[in-house]
């Protein structure tokens, strides 16, 4: 197989399909989504059989239990897919909305129309549910998609793609609107992320090493985040009960998510009161504390031991584990400096009762999501009310923070005239 | 001079200044802009003397008249700069606006806050007015700027930078908020477009070869367009008087601008009526017509000669000259196909009285600005009501079309809580 030619062909067909998708009616797109849901319910056993073949191969190759778990298409996962498809069908169609249409002194009317981006490439690892989630969001937002899942999930993804094709056909939409790369050859990814003439944006879904590699090589813009080094800053005007609840939730609700707190910053003025309280709660849940010298002194004075000395590297580490870096800062300005310097511009929160500080923190912390008196765990498309999430972006251009349907669209200017010319 | 170290230092200082700019008050930013305007008026002769030294050097090097013209800082250019600064000061400050703040079922409020991008690199050629225009827009939008003008304008740009610094200082804003690269070494550009840790976006202003080179090498995202291959499609339901006025204006109002029509598409059903009319008007203004075979037949039947046969290359050429490619298409679908395939996604217009076709054209033409019954020459920040323009973007991500202050900002999510945690 000539990968270059194969991918070019996929790209060309996606581009053609994207034109039809851009003008597809809301009813047709919704009908396709519902038809895919119905097909998945009908073909439940076929899908599980395809998944079983993927799983057998993965076990043969010696993949670990966590990998097998992610690869497994359980009944629960299938139900979630079906539910997700119906939910995306029920979301408002973002396409075609014209906003801000205003008359200009010349007589023309100028506004902005929301339109699809065109062709979206999704690169992901072993979770087969991404195939359906990503396809559903791209379809609803009027885009064509090229899906490149992990090679270990190929049988399952191919089976899912067949059902997506059936749904598209049932709604008289082009089957090329969702294509799955049906080769395990890694060169296919290299081509996908460089064929700028056919692909408008890449959404990578996966671990940090995948994203880092794609960032190096991609010539197509990406909607992505590399890591989530999220902070909670407990201000000296914090309500201690709120601080305790938020810090606990931000760190221990789930250890492995990108919006989990990795560094706790505490204002010097409240440290001797707040830090022992917070530290005891973390240690009760077996969270390892990596502390700066001043935090160690405060905690040891309160008879709290089992502390690890933080190194410079800890301030910029995403643990994704029951480990927390802890540092005392002089004031909010120092906290903001620290967050902007060491963080990953993902999600950061302040706990304070002081209005001016709350507003300054919101404005000056240079992150995609900035919060006052709320857990960083809320940084999520569903929690933010987007209805769905294709990913989270730490970049400042285009979509920033959790990305829903709107992030898969673009605004173009539209001008309505009556024969006007420029003077 | 160690260029790498020099640029890194510039970048680091810009990043620090960007934090102060992000929290600068509207009053301080406006005061700085007005102070720069006053300083330019006062130092008019100093600036002209600096420019005279640049001009002498450029003449010595044998640059042509057009180049010298662009480099010249005339009294008119100085007046325009001063006026531009005062106008940007009078524009609404886009920074800090919070939109869409809504309560979620969990009790948190989620909205989006408009914030500066951070550090913007401007790379331009010989026009010294860009120094002031770009600095003014970046300053007003709360960004720090690194300006890299053409080496031929170095004396003038350095003199302007001194006055900008004076204005910043008068408003108690950091002087590093606007820095000029004071070396003619080309390696400085190479560093500027790759130091992603210090520069958030690059805005190139200049000819196609500059932009193309930067596109190849830049690791920092760019707000840019490569070329403007703009179309007017005269539908068979067009009003002929509107078609004549729009086509004339779109082509002949100015030949060298990016929103000038380069290809005229005419529907077969109206060609024998419309094409001779339009062609005679163009030929009366010495516009060379490069026509497809069918257009030639129609025009020759109307006794119109002096036609050049169009080649495939003509459909994707930006002439920037009194030359026009002309083609007959079967219908609007063929016109849209042609525009999407051969155009540059900049600005395209339809002339039609048919409502459904007008709306379909708006939706399906994949360009930054799409127009009905208006001249493509309207694609401009001032004409669109943005108040100012830093450039035009043909990209679909982030800003698309004419880019004003808003294009130099980003939306981050803000969450206002009262101690909420995620369930």
Image (cartoon, coloured by chain):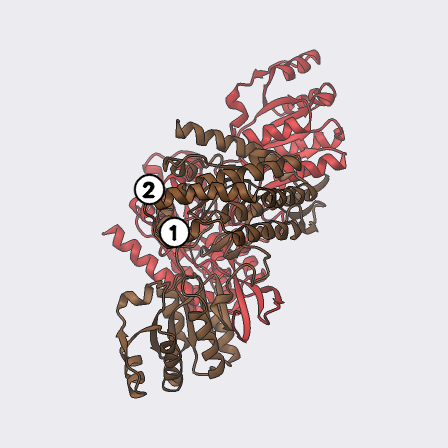
Chain colours: A red, B brown
Do we see residue B131 in this rendering? yes
As helix, strand or loop, the secondary structure at mark 2 comes to helix
Name the subunit of mark 2: A
- Residue B289 pos. (x, y %): 32, 74
Q: Nearer the viewer, mark 1 or mark 2?
A: 1
* Disc 1 from disc 2: Cα separation: 66 Å
In x, y percent, where is residue A224?
A: 48, 44
Front in this rendered view, residue A420 or A30: A420
Tell me the number on the disc at residue B67: 1
Return the residue at label 2: A57
**Residue that appears at 40% across and 71% down:** B336
Do circles 1 and 2 both sit on a common chain? no
Q: Give the crowd class for mark 2: few <14, some 14-19, many >=20 residues within 10 Å.
A: some
Secondary structure type for disc 1: helix
- The picture places residue B242, in percent across and down from the top left corner, at 49, 79
Horizontal arrangement in the rendering, residue A74 relative to residue B67 (left or right): right
């Amino acid at each position: 197989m000539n990968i270059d030619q194969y991918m070019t062909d996929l790209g060309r067909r996606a581009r053609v399909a994207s034109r039809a998708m851009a003008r597809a009616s809301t009813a047709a797109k919704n009908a396709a989504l519902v038809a895919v849901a119905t097909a998945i319910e009908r073909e439940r056993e076929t899908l599980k059989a395809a998944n079983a073949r993927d799983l057998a191969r993965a076990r043969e190759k010696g993949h670990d239990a966590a990998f097998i778990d992610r690869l497994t298409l359980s009944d629960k996962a299938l139900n979630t897919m079906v539910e997700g498809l119906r939910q995306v069908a029920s979301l408002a169609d973002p396409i075609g909305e014209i906003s801000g249409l205003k008359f200009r002194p010349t007589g023309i009317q100028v506004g902005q129309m929301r339109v699809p981006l065109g062709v979206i490439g999704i690169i992901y690892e072993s979770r087969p549910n991404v195939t359906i989630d990503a396809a559903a969001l791209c379809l609803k937002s009027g885009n064509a998609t090229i899906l490149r899942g992990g090679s270990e999930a190929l049988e399952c993804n191919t089976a899912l793609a067949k059902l997506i094709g059936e749904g598209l056909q049932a709604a008289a939409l082009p089957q090329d609107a969702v294509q799955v790369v049906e080769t395990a050859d890694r060169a296919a990814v290299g081509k996908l992320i460089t064929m700028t003439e056919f692909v408008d944006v890449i959404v990578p879904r996966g671990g940090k090493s995948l994203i880092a590699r794609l960032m190096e090589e991609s010539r197509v813009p990406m909607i992505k985040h590399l890591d989530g080094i999220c902070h909670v800053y407990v201000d000296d005007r914090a309500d201690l009960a709120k601080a305790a609840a938020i810090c606990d939730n931000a760190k221990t609700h789930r250890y492995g998510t990108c919006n989990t707190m990795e560094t706790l910053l505490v204002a010097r003025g409240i440290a001797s009161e707040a830090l022992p309280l917070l530290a005891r709660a973390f240690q009760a849940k077996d969270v390892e504390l990596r502390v700066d010298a001043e935090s160690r002194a405060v905690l040891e004075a309160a008879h709290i031991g089992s502390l690890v000395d933080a190194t410079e590297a800890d301030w910029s580490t995403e643990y994704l584990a029951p480990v927390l870096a802890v540092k005392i800062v002089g004031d909010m300005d120092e906290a903001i400096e620290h967050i902007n310097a060491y963080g990953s511009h993902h999600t950061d929160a302040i706990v304070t009762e002081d209005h001016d500080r709350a507003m300054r923190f919101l404005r000056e912390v240079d992150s995609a999501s900035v919060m006052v008196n709320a857990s960083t765990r809320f940084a999520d498309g569903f929690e933010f009310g987007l209805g769905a999430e294709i990913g989270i972006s730490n970049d400042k251009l285009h979509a920033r923070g959790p990305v829903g349907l709107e992030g898969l669209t673009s605004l173009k200017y539209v001008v309505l005239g009556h024969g006007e010319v420029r003077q």
